[in-house]
Image (tube, grey):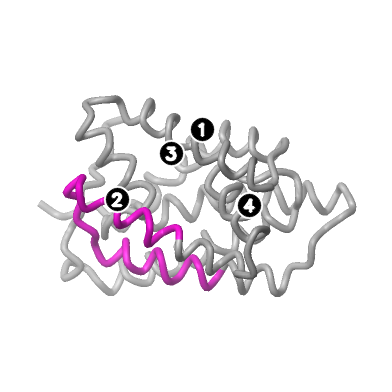
Amino acid sequence: MASLDLRPVSVAVSPARRLPQLLLGLALYGFSMAMMTRAGLGLDPWDVLHEGIMKRTSLTFGTVVAIASVGVLLLWIPLRQKPGIGTVLNVIVVSVTVDLGRAVLPPQHELIWQILLLVGGIVFNGLATAAYVGTRLGPGPRDGLMTGLAARTGGSVRLVRTGIELVVLAVGWLLGGTVGVGTVLYALSIGPLAQAFLPLLVYRARS
């Protein structure tokens, strides 16, 4: 299968389709994060960091996500990365919906419900990633940091992403974030899930 073109496309092109998909994708992303945090079986590396900071402060999970996202965007400046409307909305929508999701989903302590929340959260996260990335309206803050560092250092995207997430995971764990089987399951499955959903959701510009 030919590789998909994910280069940014102006928001003025097909906004009636792409903007709703972007907003729904970002909202689902935030809700899927809430599902995984309530499962209590381990989080993805960035959410381990977010939870660790939350535990050390009086801030909500969503507020920590927003602050961390802005901090990451500041790192774009020396990397000469340019945000798009998708980048800005990522910061706002995800931080709001993760708090809303945590408000309606209580922490789970029975294993069956923990497993269901974890697996459902990971699958929805893969779908949401494909949905918002597929609109081609600008990368999320963390994705832009990854691609910017890869471009500036000459390293592979895989190597740069692995390095970033290992550092983030270690710091988050030291702060008290939840590391567990969910962390491993997320790492192994999120890439294949997003890749499977992406061809169904990516915007293909007409030539």
Q: How crowded is the residue under tag 2: few (<14 C-alpha within 10 Å), some, or many (20+)?
A: some
Q: N-terminal of the two: label 2 or label 3?
A: 2
**Magenta span covers which residues?**
68-97
List the residue tagged with mark 3: 195
The percent coordinates of residue 13 (x first, y second) are 17, 66
**Quick one: 199 or 19, which is closer to the camera?**
19
Give the residue type at disc 2: Leu
The residue positioned 16% from the left and 70% from the top of the image is 12
The residue that mark 2 highlights is: 75
Q: CA distance from mark 2 to mark 4?
A: 21 Å
Residue found farthest to the right = 110
Q: Main secondary structure of the magenta part?
A: helix
Quadrant of the image occupied by residue 171: top right
Residue kind at label 4, given as amino acid type: Gly
179 relative to 189 in the view: left or right = right
Amino acid tagged 3: Gln
